[in-house]
Amino acid sequence: MPIPASQPLPPSADSAAAPADGTVTDRLVEANRRYATAFTDPGMDARPVLKVAVVSCMDARIDLHAALGLELGDCHTIRNAGGVVTDDIIRSLTISQRALGTRSVVLIHHTGCGLLNLTEDFRHDLAAEVGQRPTWAVEAFKDLDEDVRQSMQRVRTSPFLLHTDDVRGFVFDVTTGLLREIDPRP
């Protein structure tokens, strides 16, 4: 399975995404300058008001704050490919709980996830292409519900986490915007 090369955005999206004389990153930096002109320090602590950490996929179609009715300062948001609970997610959750007071964990996978179509062959193809084996697993899956259960189990059994009694998992439907809760028992 060849690894796809970076492809330019389609013409219509390309013109909307980047200035004619710069990159997408230039556009983001300029947007930040505009944002900063009206920015005022909200005077918040780094501790989430709702004492919750939300782990989700990095998919660009998911606006977590809007989907969950969250405001700035309400939660810690931790995202990665698939929303899978990996060692780095446990690291972030451990810091979130032990240093910043969170007590609840919400896990969110979603329909149409790219990890549903990948396999560990991705790692092997990548190693063949670049000459070095990745130190990480792809963590691809075929069954959304089962992977949410596995992620809940990883959180609940981690010796590093203090609060594992309020861990709930969901699948976000990217076509309806609704969450479907996953029973931890199959």
Image (cartoon, helix red, strand yellow):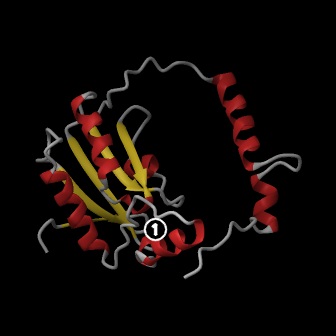
Where, quadrant-wise, is the N terminus in this rendering?
bottom right
Which residue ends up furthest to the bottom in the rendered image? 1
How far across and how far down the image is residue 182, in percent? 22, 67
Q: Is residue 113 visible?
A: no
Seen in the image, is 39 located left or right of residue 174? right
How far across and how far down the image is residue 83, in percent? 37, 58
Q: Can residue 131 be seen in this view?
A: yes
Residue found at x 32% / y 27%: 47
Residue found at x 82% / y 67%: 11
Q: Quadrant of residue 40?
A: top right
- Mark 1 sits on what residue? 174
* Along the line of sight, the residue nearer the viewer: 58 or 161: 161
Which residue ends up furthest to the right in the rendered image? 21
Q: How crowded is mark 1: few (under 14 residues within 10 Å), some or many (20 or more)?
A: some
Seen in the image, is 37 located left or right of residue 111? right
* Along the line of sight, the residue nearer the viewer: 90 or 63: 90
How far across and how far down the image is residue 186, in percent? 14, 75
Q: In which quarter of the image is residue 184?
A: bottom left
Total number of numbered discs in the rendering: 1
How far across and how far down the image is residue 112, in percent? 45, 74
Residue found at x 31% / y 73%: 144
Q: Which amino acid does label 1 sit on?
A: Val
Which residue ends up furthest to the front in the rendered image? 131
User: Relative to 56, is 2 above or below?
Assistant: below
Of helix, strand and loop, which one carries label 1?
loop
